[in-house]
Amino acid sequence: MTCTQAKELFSEYYEGTLSGGLLHELERHLNEDPACAHEYEAFKAVMGSFESLPPIEIPADLGERIARRLDKADWEAKQTRKVPFGWLRLGLVGVTAAALLVVGLIELNRTGNDGGVKAGYIVSGGKVVEPTSVIKQDGTYMLQVIADKATHVLISLGGVGPGMPPQDSVQVRRETAEAGTTLKMQLEDRGGPKEIVYASADNDNSVTAVIFPGTKTAPEGLLRSLTDISTWHGVVIEMKVSSFDSASRAVALSSDLDKDLQAALGGTPYHYVIEGKLVRIR
Amino acid sequence: MSNPEPQDAVLIERSKRGDRHAFDDLVAKYQTRVYQFAYRLSGDGETASDLTAEAFVRVYTNLHRFRFDSKFTTWVFRIVTNCFLDLRKREQVRKHESLEELLTTADSEMKKQFGSEDESPLEIAERGERGKALEAAIQRLPEYQRAMIVMYHIEMLSYEEIAQTLDMPIGTVKSRLNRARLALKQVLDPMQELFSG
């Protein structure tokens, strides 16, 4: 037996699974060749040293990091599932527009700039209760999620890339609301975020974009216009969005919020409600 | 067909039906082991975190393909290994500690150890250096050999599980593992003394 042949058998010999003639040949070779025997001893020593490997420290944010990637995968899957064909998308826009037209027939009379509902839609004499919406509580804007079933809520910031929320947005929070509960998540620190906040709850069919005054980055089109309006009028805008399809070039340069919003939303199926400093756009 | 842990089987089935909570529970259960495996493959914490996250995304999006033909962990390890090999293909670079520097340090420490019968702090330090040297040597192996060593010696997978993970016959696993072990020994040959004590 040569040394090369002997080395081919080291593992089996080490594990004690070698038997018969090969075992006898190998042992004879190792007895006759001290160098090869030394090689085997070194092999055995290395095989017995794995317990000395340093322990591995698990990063504290590992779970969060995995969750963020899974959230992103969820989003991408959701985007892929959404209306795969252009013509179908067009059809849905038509249906949505028709529905809004009907709602428009029961639109509230404009009651002047008294802080109440100025324009928008009503159902049975009250405002539409959305599963995900922005509320103001103790002077702070909160995301409120009414969870009719166990609901995951994701909060992302900024981004201008494609997708909703944009692919390059940064997911900053993720919470779970138990079925039958209402979850409230604070949306702002002092002065509000400087990027659009995207909120999504998986019991809702749309993404809520929340625009605080002073928001710096926004995708082109309608959201860009609304960031300008938000800053110009000092209002917080909550908007239900699913794509960037609705674009408007209106820029808020006047002091008339109503006029600016109409200009920005003109040609889109969106309606708005003004509640004090909060503007809801659906 | 492999019999998964009952709890795993329930979580997997619920996850397949879109229950994210169930999948989160699977992640919580296996993330440490997956990270450790990824770390041993990549030798780098940041890369290991990326590999772990990427692997769980692949598990998540491909879970409908898991038919319980193997253990869940075996399937997950296969995905982690593929993520790692894909990463290496993309980067074509290795991030690892300089083995030479490590060996120099280990050698100078090692010489202080001989002649001592009881385990002293120095001996403990020496054992620590040996572990680091071994860790660095594993990183010097070609990717497939490294995966073999990590699966068998660190993750304690059986030949059958490694065969399933790497999709190769058991005989091939055995012969390649032997080659990987010889290669590892060869990398460590310059400091045999460190491993002979």
Image (tube, coloured by chain):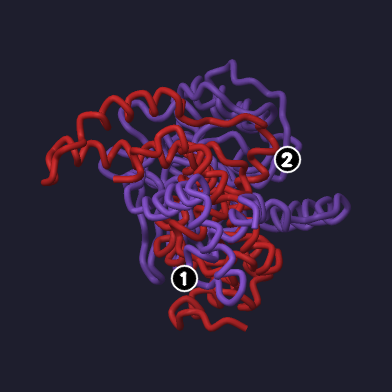
Chain colours: A purple, B red
Classify residue B104 by image quadrant. top left
Left or right of B123 in this view: A251: right
**Would residue A273 be visible to someone looking at this image?**
no
Q: Residue extending furthest front?
A: A32
Q: Chain of mark 2?
A: A
Left or right of A2 in this view: B119: left
Provide residue B122's location: percent of width, then percent of height: 17, 35
**Above or below for A256 versus A200:** above
- The residue at 64%/38% (across/down) is B88
Quadrant the N terminus of chain B occupies: bottom right
Q: Which residue is mark 1?
A: A149
**From the viewer's perspective, is the residue at label 2 or at label 1 nearer?**
1
- The residue at 78%/58% (across/down) is A95
The crowding category of the residue bearing disc 1, from other C-alpha atoms within 10 Å (few below 14, some 14 to 19, many at least 20), is few
- The residue at 38%/29% (across/down) is A192
**Above or below for B21 versus B114:** below
Dot 2 falls on a residue whose secondary structure is loop
Provide residue B180's location: percent of width, then percent of height: 58, 50
Provide residue B42's location: percent of width, then percent of height: 52, 41
**Above or below for B176 versus B146:** below
Q: Which residue is mark 2?
A: A268
Amino acid on which the number 2 mark rests in the picture: Thr
Pick whichever of labels 2 and 1 is earlier in the sequence: 1
Dot 1 falls on a residue whose secondary structure is loop
Provide residue B30's location: percent of width, then percent of height: 43, 62
Distance from disc 2 to disc 1, alpha carbons, whole Å, reads: 32 Å
